[in-house]
Amino acid sequence: MASMRNGGMWLLPAVLLGLLGLGFHQLFALRFDAGDVYPAYSSFRADPLGAKILFEALEAMPHVDVEQRLKPFAEMDGTNSTALFLGGSTGSLLHETERDLRPFVESGGRAVLAFGSVEPRINKSKKKDDEPKGDSAEMNEWVSVSESDGRIDWEVELEEFVRSDLTEIEQETEALPEAAVGLPSIPWKSALWFSELGEEWTVLYRYLGKPVVVERPYRKGSLVLLADSYAFCNEAMVQDRHTAFLIRMIGAPARILFDEQHLGVHSQEGVMMLVNRYRLQGVLFVLLAIAGLFVWQRSTSFIPRHEEESGPNDIGSGVGSMSGFNNLLLRHIPQKKLLETMVSEWIATFARTPSMQAKRTRLESELRNLDAGKHPVETYNKLTQILNERK
């Protein structure tokens, strides 16, 4: 019984820990399903700020391989492929992708780089020198990089509308296509625009007369720059989707890559990464259940154990002849009463056993004919011989 009680003591904490782990799993599952743990415009994010709807829509298309890229593009072949960089920081997106993108674009890939929406800031002429530098302060630092150092020469600058343009920005909510493009207008949320465009660039869309979507060929591939990523996000997919615009930006490749690394989402190979990749969550839960059963089995027995509750001086059906004789001696019975007491105890034990009635009669007869001068041990041996006789 003690082992069963110990098993119960182990089982209760195990059940409580299991319920606690299940609760944490559900909590994190809800967070990751919504995706708000990921940056804005991430294809893992399912709320209005993410791009999961576009990713899943493209993934459902036949004959198209869609991938969430968590590693650098270095030395990747871009043949018949499109890479989407959505929601990038204005001061770092091009710096981080220039060198990695060059082999991809040169081999025939199409790179679509869309910046995150930026609110209009104060007038440049009023900006103080000691004001903290952010993305806006880095606008013009990545322009016209030479190809001699192994980078792409972008030949473009990025500017912002300032507060003096706020009235026009509030009134104008769409970017208009160039006449030759033949595309519909699209919703626009950002104050960014491109300037100092090189001859290779073609303007596709303008906002307040400024270029906001531009495209250029580069070797075998092409580059597309967008000053806003809103048209790709989940909110736009639900409320104001423009399929023709998306097709023009992405093209018709056999492979589409959603880059997540520029948003800070990196791949870290580990046990849980392999579990998620090969969908082994069920196997993991089975292993945990087996481990719990092993601990339970080691702490208790499924078969109840027999525990003797009889004391050292008790005689029962499970006690042998020598043990019974020793118990009689320990009770300090007088020598004259020893054999009589022994027989009385035997009769009391087997009084209801039919097969022992014949031996009972012989024992009582032998005890009545007992020679008073005979040694008790000899008489005990005689009585034992009677008990051991077989029919």
Image (tube, rainbow, N blue to C red):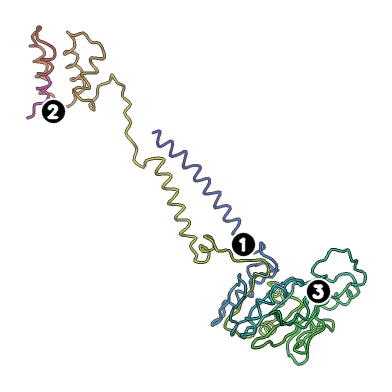
Q: Earlier in the sequence, mark 3 or mark 2?
A: 3
Category of crowding for the residue at label 2, using alpha-carbon neighbours closer than 10 angstroms: few (below 14), some (14–19), many (at least 20): few
Name the N-terminal-most of marks 2 and 1.
1
Query: In the image, 385: left or right of 196?
Result: left
In the rendered structure, does residue 310 fall within the stretch colored magenta?
no
Residue 26 x/y as whole percent = 58, 56
Distance from disc 2 to disc 1, alpha carbons, whole Å, reads: 77 Å
Quarter of the picture containing the N terminus is top left
Q: Identity of the amino acid at label 2?
A: Ser
Name the residue carrying label 1: 32
Q: Which residue is mark 2?
A: 355
357 w.r.t. 240: above or below: above
Spatial CA span between label 3 and label 1: 33 Å
Judging by the rendered image, the residue that carries numbered circle 3 is 139
Please check the rendered image and state whether residue 387 is part of the magenta-colored stretch, yes or no: yes
Residue 192 screen position, x and y as percent: 81, 76
Q: Quadrant of residue 373?
A: top left
The stretch of residues the image draws in magenta is: 383-391
Residue at 59% across, 59% down: 29
Q: What is the number of callouts on the image?
A: 3
Circle 3: residue type: Met
